[in-house]
Image (spheres, rainbow, N blue to C red):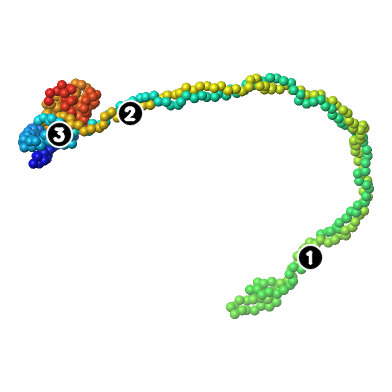
Amino acid sequence: MNQRYMKMLAIVAGAAIASGCSSMAADTTSVDAGSSAITAADLAASQQRISELESALAARERDLEEAEALSGDASSTMASTSSDASLFPPNPKAGQCYARVLIPAKYQTVSEQVLKSEAAERIEVIPARYETAQETVLVKEASTKLEVVPAVYGEVEERVLVKPASTKIVEVPAVYETVTERVLDKPAHTAWKKGPATVQSANVLSQSTTDTGEIMCLVEVPATYKTVEKRVLATPARTNTIEIPAEYKTVTKTVVKQPATTREVVIPAKYDTVTVTKLAAPASEKRISIPAEYQTVTRTNKTTEERMEWRQVMCEVNMTRDNVIALQKALADEGYYKAGLDGIIGGQTLSAARQYALDKNLPAGSNYVPIEVVKSLDLNL
């Protein structure tokens, strides 16, 4: 029997809280979406809706009181159980709304110094030091060499035979002449020609008439001649023998007047000034102590775990138009609310309340107004 009353009480209380908060969220969303087109009729409907919700809330509170009376000892048993108590806000009061919110875990940043590298020793090598100096060094020793004295030449003129005397046979070509000669071109012959004998020449031998009535005459055609040129031999070819005299030429010849000789020449030693590098100080080493090195390391430690918490919030019971205008005015006085005082919980009002809560280190929410914000603004809603 006690379990039945416990279940009944949980259902009634949960329905009352969920209905009140969900109705507030729905009304807030609808008001925010249509805040740009609010009319007097809308405000009257909103007030009527709030009155209806207040009546429904009062009826639910009466049902809750009856359920608590019937539950008796079951309610005390339910309150002692921590897992069941978390489903209800602690010490709820009539006319107040609560929201169950997730409180995130808190973290703390801690800085400490840790050893980055231990103390050590570094060996630094000091290189050898060198200096430069000028020195005269022997580049090439003295020596001797044989030098050739060239021969002396002179020029003399001499007449030399270039080509001996000889004979040459010269061919005299034949001589031809061009003569003209009259030769027969066509021999004499007879031919038939049309027309009577009177029309033809006197050389008509006979005439006859054809079947068509034409007169044909046999005419004697005399021979024809033409004049042609002809090349004939006038003098035959022959040969002549010609004497060719010898040819001489005067040339200049180079002759040796004094033969080549040799002589010994002394070559002196050769010296040069050079820059040499000399060791001034040998290489050495130096030991340098390196102190230990520390660095600051920052880490984040979790100070509190995340948890679920019930918070008292503004709801349909106290979210009247006058109360909302008072909240907007208080936020505007603090410099957080910039819009007009329309008495509607919209996006700008919720955003201003949330920013105010964050700046004052108060509980904050994105879709509800905690009662701590109302109290901090000295509002009695």
The residue at the point 60 percent across, 22 percent down is 284
Between residues 68 and 260, which one lies in front from this camera angle? 68
**Helix, strand or loop at disc 2?**
strand
**Mark on residue 130?**
none
Question: What residue does disc 3 label?
Answer: 80
Residue 360 appears in which quarter of the rendering? Answer: top left
**Nearer-N-terminus badge (3/2):** 3
**Helix, strand or loop at disc 1?**
strand
The residue at the point 28 percent across, 28 percent down is 303
Q: Is residue 30 left or right of residue 165?
A: left
Question: What residue does disc 1 label?
Answer: 182
The residue at the point 19 percent across, 21 percent down is 333
**Mark on residue 300?**
2
What is the distance, in whole Å, between disc 3 and disc 2 at their CAs? 37 Å
- Amino acid bearing label 1: Arg
Q: Of circles 1 and 3, which is in front?
A: 3
What is the distance, in whole Å, between disc 1 and disc 3 at their CAs? 171 Å
Between residues 165 and 223, which one lies in front from this camera angle? 165
Q: Residue 15's spot in the image, x, y percent?
A: 12, 38
**Nearer-N-terminus badge (1/3):** 3
- Amino acid bearing label 3: Ser
Q: Of circles 3 and 2, which is in front?
A: 3
Which quadrant, please, contains the N terminus?
Answer: top left
Q: Residue 330's spot in the image, x, y percent?
A: 17, 22
Between residues 348 and 107, which one lies in front from this camera angle? 107
- Amino acid bearing label 2: Thr
Which quadrant, please, contains the C terminus?
Answer: top left
